[in-house]
Amino acid sequence: MPANLTPMYRKAEEAFRQAKTTAEKLAALEEMYALIPKHKGTEKMQADIKRRMSKLREAGEQVKAHGGIDLFHVDKHGAGQFVLLGMPNSGKSALVGSLTKAHVTVAPYPFSTHAAVPGMMPFEDVQIQLVDLPPVTAEGPVPGMVGALKAADGIIICIDLAADVLEQMEVCMGLLETRGIVPLGRQAPEGGVARRMLIVGTKADLPGAADNFQALKELHGGIAPMAAVSTETSEGLGEVPRQCFRLLDVIRIYSKEPGKPPDKEKPFVLPRGSTVLDLAGAIHHDIAANLKRARIWGSNVYDGQPVPREHVLSDRDIIELHV
Ligand SMILES: Nc1nc2c(ncn2[C@@H]2O[C@H](COP(=O)(O)OP(=O)(O)OP(=O)(O)O)[C@@H](O)[C@H]2O)c(=O)[nH]1
Ligand SMILES: [Mg+2]
């Protein structure tokens, strides 16, 4: 029986030949496996692709056992970093492309993203970093990808509302669980981490999406907050930065020089519970070391009230530091 390979499959095969790193090779093989016509004539080829995939995964595991390499590492910027986790074609890149200025690859075929692509997402007067990642499948993640999930401040789990939402949740949560990554507030296993999580149902404009979102909420609502969005109609998109900001649990502080108006352009972003001294330290360690007095404008204080260095700050406080 002829194999009847499609041009898209041939393209994936070519990508495999060009691939230099293990991650690139694996991504190309996964694409080949996804695209190969599934019939008797290709059974041998399918088995061969699977064999090559597991060999590469083993190599990846070995690398990890020897200290691990974080192939998709992105330096953090802004108020916090959220990475995107989802199955092929779930709309991760479209989401990052809609919320940031990043040049992402959005494509109607699976496995279109091969590298980590960062972008900055504005929320009010702060910037939150999003990182687009390659997909995860039932076979597992691309080697070297788990480090990026663990290193991030938060994870956005992308679920295509026009596909099997429960299968997607199973694959995504299964991956997180086996790598010891649990939602913040739960006890992480030894060697694991607790991370902020947001579940984003994508393609809310497509038929059946509303019902699928409802099912998702009923079954998995307890894990993390959820939002339904569409990059086609922009429905619900504003929820993503709002929820990410809320999850980060940070405060914005504006600094002010004596006799001058505050710098309202670029707030200092600090963890909730931070004090006047923490702010001084974030500006410069010399300021923290020599801090004499501070005055505050904000909630629950009178304008210009003197406060001690231990004073706990609130979101949007204005602080004047005297050294
Ligand atoms: N109707 C509709 N289509 C969408 C939406 N978001 C993404 N798509 C389409 O879904 C397909 C996949 O989108 P991508 O953003 O490339 O998906 P991905 O999760 O990054 O895919 P991989 O990188 O392969 O894992 C593309 O054809 C998009 O145009 C949406 O909100 N509505
Ligand atoms: Mg993508």
Image: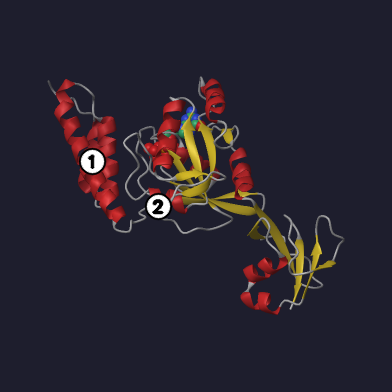
Q: Residue 54 carries which label?
A: 1
N-terminal label among 2 and 1: 1
Whole-percent x and y of residue 39? 20, 21
Question: Residue 223 — which label?
Answer: none
Instruction: Say left or right for 201 vs 18.
Output: right
Residue at the far right in the pictured view: 302
Is 6 located above or below residue 318 in the figure? above
CA distance for labels 2 and 1: 20 Å
Q: Identity of the amino acid at label 2?
A: Gly
The numbered disc on residue 147 is 2
Q: Which of 143 and 195 is in front in this view?
A: 195
Q: Is mark 1 within 8 Å of ligand 1?
A: no
The answer to whether residue 14 shows anywhere in this view is no
In the image, is 1 to the left or to the right of 293?
left
The percent position of residue 6, horizontal first and vertical second, equals: 23, 29
Residue 132 shows in this picture: yes
Q: How crowded is mark 2: few (under 14 residues within 10 Å), some or many (20 or more)?
A: some
Image position of 84 with respect to 164: above or below: below
Tell whether circle 2 marks a residue whose Cβ is less than 8 angstroms from ligand 1: no
Report crowding for label 1: few under 14, some 14 to 19, many 20 or more residues within 10 A (C-alpha). few
SS of the residue at dot 2?
helix
Left or right: 25 as drawn, with respect to 128: left
**Amino acid under label 1?**
Ser
Q: Which residue is drawn at 39% across and 32% down?
A: 108
In the image, 289 versus 200, the foreground residue is 289
- Which residue is rendered at x = 44% and y = 33% of the image? 90
Residue name at image x 56 percent, y 28 percent: 217
Quarter location, residue 4: top left
Image quadrant holding the N terminus, namely top left
Q: In this view, does 300 lie above or below 182?
A: below
